[in-house]
Amino acid sequence: MNYPVKLAGIFKGRSMDFLFDMIDVAYLERCTMEGLKRTKHHAELELHSAEFWNNDADFVFFTEYLEAVNCAISRKRYDERKTRPIINSSRIPAADVKERLDIVAVIGEYTDLRKTGNRFTGSCPLHPDLNPSLIVYPDQQSWWCYSCNKGGDIFDFIQEYDKITFPEAVSKLAGVR
Ligand SMILES: [Zn+2]
């Protein structure tokens, strides 16, 4: 049985049997995520076309097909999450995290920093601070507060602010729980 499909695309000129073969879960499971996204895009185009031409059979078919593709996508996403290796936070090299992040951007998330010469100043977010006593040194990637007499690197800051341990601070800044 030949089934006319109006839009040019991967389905053009294919028979209805071929289209139903494609719904086959095994076929969709073999698709890569990129392949599935392309298939979804084509199915959406065809669905739009079916809707436009008010062809009920096409419309029902492509709605079901799109649903099957969406199921395959969620399933693949779920499988990918399951197989992703668990990152042990204690193995994250602190030096790598430190190199990747800029101390001005990190502390800038907690308080407004103003550039004065080759340093930045701002109110210390570790306590109520009326006069800006926090100084951030981008060259040394360090900070110092003249009110609380504390300072250090990005990890020291996060440890102070969140009251957490060094590995926890490394983990937090690495974006890993
Ligand atoms: Zn302070």
Image (cartoon, grey):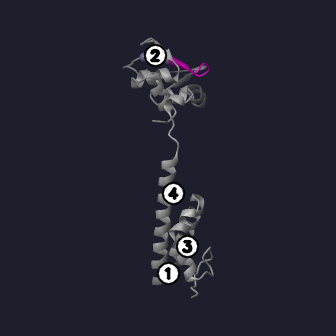
Question: What is the quadrant of the C terminus in the image?
Answer: top left
Q: Secondary structure at mark 4?
A: helix
Q: How many marks?
A: 4
Q: Residue furthest bottom?
A: 1
Spatial separation of the CA atoms under disc 2 and disc 4: 51 Å
Q: Is mark 2 within 8 Å of ligand 1?
A: yes
Residue count near mark 2 (Cα–Cα under 10 Å), binned few <14, some 14–19, many ≥20 = some
Residue 58, numbered circle: 1
Give the residue number, with chain letter if any, for mark 3.
22
Q: Is residue 124 left or right of residue 154?
A: left
Residue tagged by mark 4?
A: 76
Closer to the chain start, of discs 3 and 4, is 3
Quadrant containing ligand 1 reads top left
Q: Identify the residue under disc 2.
A: 133
**Highlighted range, magenta:** 135-145
Is disc 3 in contact with disc 4, using a CB cutoff of under 8 Å?
no
